[in-house]
């Protein structure tokens, strides 16, 4: 029993690394198993298909990321500082990934959204839920920032949250393309602009 | 001679459609040829490899898009209106694509950047040049906007141009994920915020 769940974990770990580095279509079950050091027969004992495995990788990745987002965005710091913490953590994840793998792999969800949205409905549905949840989490903080006068009064909290998530994805794309985590440094300035943070609030935060 | 260049065009057209809809790794030369209605032998007469074909598709796509960007961003309208024209044209391209194919395929360059940056150096190099050229074109307009007092004095033109390109890519990702070109509508508001356009300029533009 211990041995079988160990094989499952090895498959998941290999799949997570390979999916981040090479995407979905370029991967085969045989390669995942050989990277995991697990016989191919085991694969189908744990997972029905490559897609089922990818969904599990996505769910586990989101479970961990969600926990980090909830901690950072739900802390008792002031709302804008919580957002800054999120951006710094996002950059740090890419920096650590680059140190480990030699390359910036970007955002797993963004990578798969662009690769698979037009061809794998179940994965696409899951990614829609995840992006929606990210937008929800940020929206709550934007609402608080507005209540405290830290964001412009005409800012729509939902739309601003969607813009911030889009900016994270766009900056992650540039970071991956240029293999340069520093592309994410601008997220904080971008967020201050997208939320129309008043000048006096900005100087208080700098 | 007429017939052979016709075959080349058919291959390029099929490859452009398939690359936009399915990405690079999921495609094989056999499928491209069968979609193009061209024997597989012809393929290698015109292209050394699938990667060589992809580079040609990228170059042709950028030649057409670059021409549109230069026309829109180099017009004699006021700088911010030129940027708005660019965003509207970008949304229109996705809307037309959706009407034709039933799905929003997003930005070809963004799709390939996320799929291939960690594994195909030549494609990645070409995409870096294209994104750099896009940032250059937008930067020139931001410089003009600043000169006319339409953008905030502390805005760094290069960095703002990069942020706008990132926002386009992030919004294109959401548009593809949700199969909804309207996700790109926010680009204009986002741009006004990212450029810190003063209130009186905004009301003059609305």
Image (spheres, coloured by chain):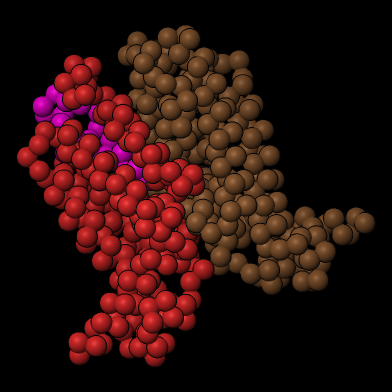
Chain colours: A brown, B red
Residue at x-position 70% and y-position 57%: A52
Residue at x-position 55% and y-position 21%: A140
Using the image as rendered, state which of residue B58 and residue A74 is in the foreground. Answer: B58
Quadrant location of the N terminus of chain A in the rendered image: bottom right
Furthest residue in direction left, as rendered = B76
Residue at x-position 42% and y-position 67%: B18
Quadrant location of the C terminus of chain A in the rendered image: top left
In the rendered structure, the answer to whether residue A136 lies left or right of residue B30 reads: right
In the rendered structure, the answer to whether residue B173 lies left or right of residue B53 reads: right
Q: Quadrant of residue A136?
A: top right
Coordinates of residue A189 in the picture (x, y in percent): 37, 28
Q: Which residues are magenta?
A: B141-169
Establish if B32 lies above or below B25. Answer: below
Furthest residue in direction right, as rendered = A1
Residue at x-position 38% and y-position 71%: B15
Using the image as rendered, state which of residue B185 and residue B162 is in the foreground. Answer: B185
Answer whether residue A149 is magenta in the image.
no
Establish if A192 lies above or below B47. Answer: above
Coordinates of residue A145 in the picture (x, y in percent): 48, 15
Establish if A155 lies above or below A186. Answer: above
In the rendered structure, the answer to whether residue B123 lies left or right of residue B81 reads: right
Q: Quadrant of residue B181?
A: top left
How would you classify the magenta stretch by its main secondary structure? helix
Confirm whether residue A35 shows in the render: no
Coordinates of residue B177 in the picture (x, y in percent): 49, 47
């Amino acid at each position: 029993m211990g041995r079988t769940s160990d094989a499952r974990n090895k498959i998941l770990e290999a799949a997570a690394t390979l999916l981040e580095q090479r995407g979905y279509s370029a991967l085969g079950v045989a390669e995942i198993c050989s990277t995991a050091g697990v016989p191919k027969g085991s694969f189908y004992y744990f997972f029905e298909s490559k897609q089922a495995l990818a969904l599990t990788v996505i769910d586990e990745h989101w479970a961990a990321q969600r926990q980090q987002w909830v901690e950072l965005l739900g802390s008792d710091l002031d709302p804008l500082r919580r957002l800054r913490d999120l951006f710094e953590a996002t950059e740090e994840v890419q920096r650590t990934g680059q140190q480990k793998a030699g390359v910036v792999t970007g955002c797993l969800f963004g990578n798969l959204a662009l690769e698979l949205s037009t061809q794998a409905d179940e994965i696409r549905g899951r990614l829609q839920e995840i992006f929606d949840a990210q937008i929800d989490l940020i929206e709550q903080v934007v609402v608080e920032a507005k209540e405290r006068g830290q964001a412009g009064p005409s800012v729509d909290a939902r739309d601003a949250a969607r813009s911030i998530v889009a900016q994270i994805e766009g900056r992650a794309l540039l970071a991956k393309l240029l293999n340069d985590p520093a592309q994410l440094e601008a997220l904080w300035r971008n967020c201050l602009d997208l939320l129309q943070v008043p000048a006096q609030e900005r100087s208080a935060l700098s």
